[in-house]
Amino acid sequence: MIIDTHAHLTDESLSGQLESVLTEAQGVGVTGVLAVATNLATSHACLELAQKYAGVRASVGIHPNYCAEAQPDDFAAISQLADQPRVAAIGETGLDRHWDDSPWDMQVASFRQHIALARHVSRPLIIHTRDCAEETLELLRSETRAGGAFRAVMHSFTGPQAVADGCLELGLYISFAGMLTYKNAADLRAIAQTIPADRVLVETDCPYLTPHPFRGQRPNRPALVVHTLACLAEVRGVSVAELAAQTSRNAQQLFGAW
């Protein structure tokens, strides 16, 4: 069993081919996929997919880059979905300084809302960070000091090592996507060696971040997580089968049984 812990299955690039995408994934052993939302519409859509397909579970939430587009009642509507049985996580949420789509203060407020919701419904949090990893970690530390520890994963992790160490100290999981396989990602592979076995996850972040040897091709899809898994296994000096079993155990420890 392999679990792709982060896939945007509702992306329009996968429209009309989801049946074949999931069949392809099952054919290479990817029997679990977490369909990740970015706004209210995709939260509804991800939940519908999870209710339709046994191997799919859903997240609900508003991506930091979509905060400014959200309507005043959107988060309340998402909160109503959050404790549905097929909802495995809250998010993705977090902070992003790469794109200028949402004001920083709005991102911070939304991130804190998502953390509060995750605590309220006892669901783990899916965290996005881009070009602000240290600031994201500091907010997580602040929230932990104020309200206690909560379950979360730093998705599509890119570093640096100090942030990985800080996340681990807070009890977070670290998930690696296709970037791990890129020739210029030696520093990231070095970090991947240091993550405890019971805290590491794999994902595609499809339709983005297609792994080597398919880098540059779109859309990425859950079946290709096997390439990231194989790279991670080589880096960590374990067999693919062993790492598949370990990451699947970790995913179910964090998100619940598939």
Image (cartoon, rainbow, N blue to C red):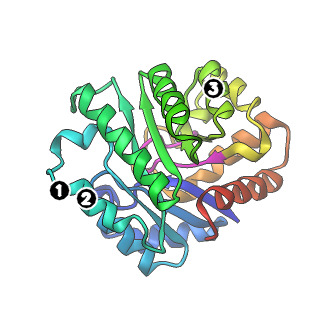
Image quarter for residue 59? bottom left
Q: How far apart are marks 1 and 3 (CA)?
A: 34 Å
Task: Report the disc number at residue 2.
Answer: none
Instruction: List the residue tagged with mark 3.
Output: 166
Q: Is residue 207 magenta?
A: yes
Return the residue nearer the eye: 87 or 76: 76
Which quadrant holds the N terminus?
bottom right
Circle nearer the N terminus (2, 3): 2
Q: Give the range drawn in magenta.
A: 201-213
Circle nearer the N terminus (1, 3): 1
Three-letter code, disc 2:
Ala
Local crowd size for mark 3, using a 10 Å CA cut-off: few (<14), some (14–19), many (≥20): some
Three-letter code, disc 1:
Asp
- Residue 57 placement (x, y as % from top left): 49, 68
Return the residue nearer the eye: 175 or 213: 175
* Residue at figure coordinates x 81%, y 56% from the top left: 241
* Residue at figure coordinates x 59%, y 20% from the top left: 160
Instruction: Name, please, the residue furthest toward the front.
Output: 146
Decide if residue 209 is on the left or right side of residue 25.
Answer: left
Image quarter for residue 157? top right
Task: Report the disc number at residue 76.
Answer: 2
